[in-house]
Amino acid sequence: MPFSETTLISPYAQIADDVVIGEGCRIESGVVIGAGTQLADGVKLEPEVSLGENNVIGVGTVIKSGTQLGSGNQIAEYCVLGGPPLISGRIALPGRLCIGDRNVIREFATIQVGTDEDGVTCIGNTNYIMPNVQIGHDSRVGNKVTLTNKASLCGHVTIEDEVVLGLGATIHQHCRIGRLAMVGATAYVSRDIVPFVLVDGRSGGIVGLNKIGLARRGFSQFTISELKSAYRVIFREALSRQEITARLQNHPCPEVQELLSFLISSNRGIEQARKSK
């Protein structure tokens, strides 16, 4: 395991024999790096970082204390993983950042740890996180999510599986984005977004079902039709939450029940459909 003269490695780091480490890396005490990992030029790892197998990490990336990566992740140049939360005031015991497997995290993305000793920011598996994305403290990102350039999660945000956030979309603290929702470019989201819908980037309002996304993921025309009917009940008939529940609670379609369950459990309130002119 030969190293360049420009590489600084603590004698207290735990590094597998086949790890490839490029020039300009800095690896501090307490780091654990599994077999098959490749560290490109300029990488800096800080204490208590844990990397699984076959991770590839680009030039200039900083991985801070309390960060754990699974296997097969591709981290591009100049990312900051595990930075302190972007909040005012001192944090005595910052939390952790846990990243799963097979994620692609592109250039200049930043992801912060949780806000206290028990706080965790979680990134699931097989996500595509594009350049300059910001994922704030205590947020949770599911699986197969696409976060487009400059999308921002402001902290305590939950992004469910297969969501797509468009260019520059901003999600307010404590908001949830339901499964397979698609949020348009530059949208500002301050309330929960139910699953399976499209959000207009200009107005931030819901504009219908994500029918193309549903079809691409193998949802049957019957299921899409049932979701469309449920959508009309929720957004077009001016019903209260209790009335919506009464109409849909015995519906046989599992996806409709998922939609209703999300609606019932929302604490922040549901984003409404965009009004027609």
Image: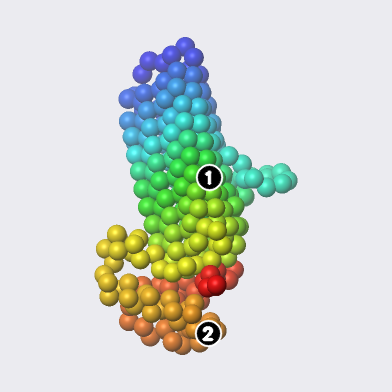
At horizontal 55% and vertical 62% (from top left) the residue drawn is: 204
| Mark 2 residue crowding within 10 angstroms, few (<14) / some (14–19) / many (20+) | few
Q: Which mark is residue 34?
A: none
The residue sitting at the front extreme is: 277
Q: Which residue is mark 2?
A: 239
**Figure quadrant of residue 247:** bottom left
At horizontal 40% and vertical 22% (from top left) the residue drawn is: 21
In the figure, 268 relative to 32: above or below? Answer: below
The residue sitting at the top extreme is: 5
**Figure quadrant of residue 232:** bottom left
Tell me if label 1 and label 2 are in contact, CB under 8 Å: no
| Mark 1 residue crowding within 10 angstroms, few (<14) / some (14–19) / many (20+) | many
SS at badge 1: loop
At horizontal 53% and vertical 73% (from top left) the residue drawn is: 276
**Figure quadrant of residue 210:** bottom left
In the figure, 260 relative to 38: above or below? Answer: below
Q: Quadrant of the N terminus?
A: top left
Foreground residue among 22 and 127: 127
Q: Position of residue 209 (x, y in %)?
A: 41, 68
58 relative position to 82: left or right: left
In the figure, 53 relative to 7: above or below? Answer: below
SS at badge 2: loop
Q: Which residue is mark 1?
A: 150
Q: CA distance from mark 1 to mark 2?
A: 36 Å
At horizontal 44% and vertical 33% (from top left) the residue drawn is: 76
Q: Position of residue 252 (x, y in %)?
A: 32, 81
Can residue 32 be seen? no
Can residue 17 be seen? yes
Q: Position of residue 192 (x, y in %)?
A: 54, 66
Q: Earlier in the sequence, mark 1 or mark 2?
A: 1
